[in-house]
Each structure stands twice: as structure tokens, then as C-alpha cells.
Image (spheres, rainbow, N blue to C red):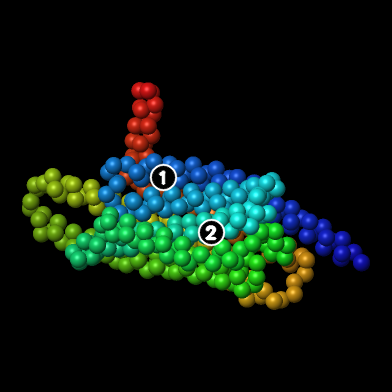
Amino acid sequence: MSSVPINSTLILTINDLSFNLNRYLSIIIFIFGTIGNLLNCLALSQRTLRSNPCATLFLASSIASIITLISGVAVRLLAGWSADLTDTSNSLCKIRIFILFTSRTIASWFITLATCDRWLSSSLHANHRRLSTLRNAQRGMIIIILLCFLLYAQIFYCYEANLVDSPLKCYGRTTWCRLLIDSEFTSIGVLLPSILMFIFGFLTIVNTRQMTRRRLELVTMNANTQVVTLNEQHSWRVKKTDQHLLFMLLVQVILLTLFSLPQAIQNLYANATRYEIRSSVQIAKNNFIFNLFILLTYVTNGMPFYIYTLSGGKVFRQGLFNRIQNFLQKITCH
């Protein structure tokens, strides 16, 4: 007899936690993520990095992350205050979800392209190094954007507003729609980019070690020579910049995978057990986990600036300082 009120209290507590999670954690992620990505754009758009394909991909990924935070976290923040129009409007629901999924996937694949670029630029083979160009990076970005648009086009058919029996009011209208979209995002938006990032990251480390070994051999051969040319100094600065970019990239890849995989696993579990009969308590728990893991994936879109600041060395921090200084000078001059 007493189990019914106990379960009701537990359900209310879990639902209240989910509500407050959407309301308050969303605020933190949105504010810090948006500010961080804007500062990323400021630092990575400096003239010295404009010709660097890896820095360009970082910049493009930051722009895609800003779009993700606005279309994802900002809307969830409004939902916490019962002001989300996409829950009631079919057209707004479809447009928001399409922008959200495409921008999140684009941001992940731009980082994947950056890992591929670091592998090419660190290769001992000249033919591979020649492929690491700004033009090829731009071509890759255009291809990824077009493919993502095609990949998620079915969202305009599958998603619908005002749903009741679903984790969110704006969600896939049928079981097969949910399975299709979740499987696509899990495999193409999370798992495949993560696997490729680790593969190219490992290959880049191997190339870097080989390059370091060869450089040490050259230093040993030229130990009696004390002359350092300007070209050698410039080459050393470029290599130092590349090393900082590589370290920034590897840290971001690891954290992106750790924060993205929980939602991918939860989606697979939800789809595998979608026909099981669940109690009201279990449904409340699953909704809480669903909301928590979704917000964790948005952390990956808000953390790059803080990763770059801590792991980017003087390359990123000095660039950011110079951009802010120039911006303040322009304001004071006017």
C-alpha cells in the first residue's frame, strides 16, 4: 500500500531533477560555450593562422559549435522556462532539429578533417605533405556540409511537434523514424568520427616521432656547424606551431569522444529495448539520463576555447591577446 506514494514521490523527484537540469545546466553550458567559441573565432582568425589548414578547420568547427549551442542548448533553456515554440510548431521543430543535427555532425567532422590534416602535414613523404593545403581543407568542408544536408534531409519528414509519448515534444513521430535518426547520428556523428580521429591521431604521433628521430640524426651530423639560417629559424617556428596544434587536437579528440559516447550508447540501448514494458519510475529515470547525456554532448561544443587556452601554448594565447589588443585599440581610436 505504501509503495504507491513512495514511487510517486520518487517520480516527482526525478522529474524535478530533469527540469532543473535543463534550466540551470543549460545556462552554464550556453554562456561559457558561446563566449568561448566567440573568443576562438577571434584568436583563430588572426592573419598568421589564416593560411594554416588545421587552424582554419578549428575556426570552422567553432562556428558550427556556436550554431549547435544556439539551436540546441538555447532552445532547451527556453523549454526549462516553458517558452520553447518548437514544441508546438511543426515547421520550427523540423528546421531546428535539422540545423542542430547538421551543425553537430559538421563540427565533429571538421575536427576529424583537422586530425587528417595533421597526419598529412607530419608525414615523411613529400607527396602526403603537399596534400595539407588550405584549398584541400576548404574542399573537404564543402563536401562535408553538402553530405550532412543530404544525410539529415529525412528530418523534415520524420520529426513532429506536440508529441506526448516521447522523451521530447519535438521528436521522431514513429519508432522507425527515431531508430533511423538516432542510428545515423550515433554512427556518423559520433562513432565514425571518433574512430577516425583516434586512427589519424595515432598515425600523427607515429609520424611526429619519426620526424623527431630524423631531426636528431641531422643535428648529430651537423654538430660541428654553428650557423643557423633565417630559413631554419622560420621552419622551427612553423614546426612549433604545428606541435601545439597537434596537442590541442588530441586533447579535444579525447574529450569529445568521452562526452559524446554516453549519448550514443544510451541511444543504442533505448532502440534495443524500445518494445519493453517499463514502469513509471523507469521511464522517469530514462528521461533523466536522456537529458543528462544530451547536455553532456553540448559540452563538447562549448569546451574547445578552454582546451586551446590550456593546451595551445603561446601560439593560441598570444594570438588571442593580440586580437583583443587590436580590437581595443580600434575602439579607443574611434
In the displayed structure, 40 sits above or below 151; it is: above
Is residue 227 toward the left or the right of residue 17 in the image?
left
Q: Mark 2 falls on what kind of element?
A: helix
Spot occupied by residue 21 in the image (x, y as percentages of width and height)? 66, 51
User: To which residue does mark 1 refer?
Assistant: 40
Residue 250 visible somewhere in the drawing? no
Residue 98: give its label.
2
Spot occupied by residue 305 in the image (x, y as percentages of width and height)? 44, 47
**Which residue is more in the foreground, 6 or 300?**
300
Q: Given the image, on which type of amino acid does mark 1 rest?
A: Asn
The C terminus, quarter of image = top left
Decide which of tag 2 and tag 1 comes sooner along the chain: 1
Spot occupied by residue 278 in the image (x, y as percentages of width and height)? 75, 71
Is residue 111 toward the left or the right of residue 2 in the image?
left
Marks counted in the figure total 2
Residue at 40%, 48% (x, y): give it.
Answer: 308
Residue at 50%, 44% (x, y): give it.
Answer: 34
Q: Quadrant of residue 169?
A: bottom right
CA distance separating discs 2 and 1: 25 Å
**Which residue is more in the foreground, 182 or 84?**
84
What crowding class fits label 2: few (fewer than 14 Cα within 10 Å), some (14-19), or many (20 or more)?
many
Spot occupied by residue 298 in the image (x, y as percentages of width and height)? 54, 54
Q: Nearer the viewer, mark 2 or mark 1?
A: 2
**Which residue is more in the foreground, 74 or 286?**
74
Q: Given the image, on which type of amino acid does mark 2 rest?
A: Phe
Residue at 65%, 67% (x, y): give it.
Answer: 173
Q: Mark 1 falls on what kind of element?
A: helix
What crowding class fits label 1: few (fewer than 14 Cα within 10 Å), some (14-19), or many (20 or more)?
many
